[in-house]
Image: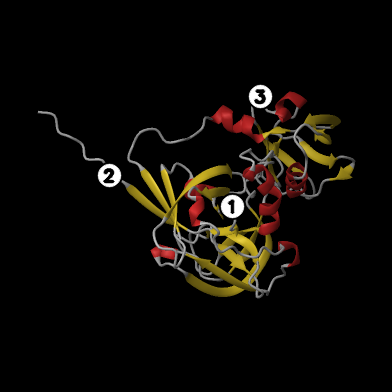
Amino acid sequence: PERRQQERRIHGHGSGFCVDGSSGIILTNAHVVQGADRITANFAGRGTPMECEVLETDEVIDLAAIRVKDRSKLPLPSMAVGSSETVRPGDWAIVLGNPLGLQNTCTLGIVSSLDRSTGETGFDWMRHPLLQTDAAVNQGNSGGPMLNELGEVVGMISMRALFGEGIGFAIPVDSIRSALPSLLSSKKVPRSYLGLKMTATAPGGDHGGEGAWVDTVLSGSPADHAGFKEEDQIIELNGRKVRYFEEVQAAVRSTQVGSKLSFKVKRGTQSIALSVTAADIRKLREGAGTGGRSGGNPRVMILQ
């Protein structure tokens, strides 16, 4: 006789915060809700969990906007949103969340550093600044708010260092604010990419001083179509001297999809001018596949 397989639900926990109580809009990390079959949100003193729906996600900066389905539960308590532009190293950092399933946990620390980069791998589309804090961050804090001393949200906890203590990272709230209009309209946030992986090391392993060297050109990418080659040295971008590959990353991040970037590269003894039209990173993701789950056990995500 056939053995009946018992369906098993996998429960996960994360954190989030409400930014629009009248509409029931809650923000969290994209990785918290990704692949979830059901999402519920708990608010202290609000009784039973509230069913939520995902409006849209932005995987590039790890942001998701979700909405409470039952409007009879509204309004919800919302948080004041500040500005990460005013944050300085040494400022107080207050982290709220649900670490290890411990609801309504508050930890205190300082802002340790600004503009930590997610793009140290050298890919042109992966430089997105993060705030660093020494406030305690653990599994389950993802998606929770980081506040300043005025109680204003200045960041969203996204990750912590895998090794070591007192190293957590938050998405600056100004980055969140710029992505919100698209997410609330259930649209993907346009993100530019060229298709270059860069390094500060010259061919042969020597650190070649100023400039950026092309390590990899993605096949079929805008950079590939523009004529970039491996081992090209990028020396100018839009008429300005390039000292570090992070400058190229920052330029790509601030460039609109469809805009052109003018490069000057050194290839051997030649100086070559190249023009690249930035494309939407969704083309890159579509080419790599969706990466979504198929089959398996239902996944339930609980935000608190």
Quote the CA–CA distance across marks 1 and 2: 33 Å
Q: Does the CB distance between marks 1 and 3 fall below 8 Å? A: no
Circle 2 residue: 8
Query: Quick one: which residue is furthest to the right in this view?
Result: 239
* Tag in front: 3 or 2: 2
Q: Amino acid at mark 2?
A: Arg
Q: Residues within 10 Å of mark 3 (few under 14, many from 20)?
A: few
Q: Nearer the viewer, residue 223 or 254?
A: 254
Earlier in the chain: of badge 1 and badge 2, it is 2
Circle 3 residue: 220
Earlier in the chain: of badge 1 and badge 3, it is 1
Circle 1 residue: 23
Whether 32 is drawn above or below 114: the answer is above
Q: Residue at x 66, y 24 (%)?
A: 220
Whether 127 is drawn above or below 223: the answer is below
Quote the CA–CA distance across marks 1 and 3: 42 Å
| Circle 1: element type | loop
Q: Amino acid at mark 3?
A: Gly
Q: Residue at x 68, y 28 (%)?
A: 221
Q: Position of residue 38 (x, y in %)?
A: 41, 45
Q: Position of residue 48 (x, y in %)?
A: 39, 59
Q: Residues within 10 Å of mark 1 (few under 14, many from 20)?
A: some
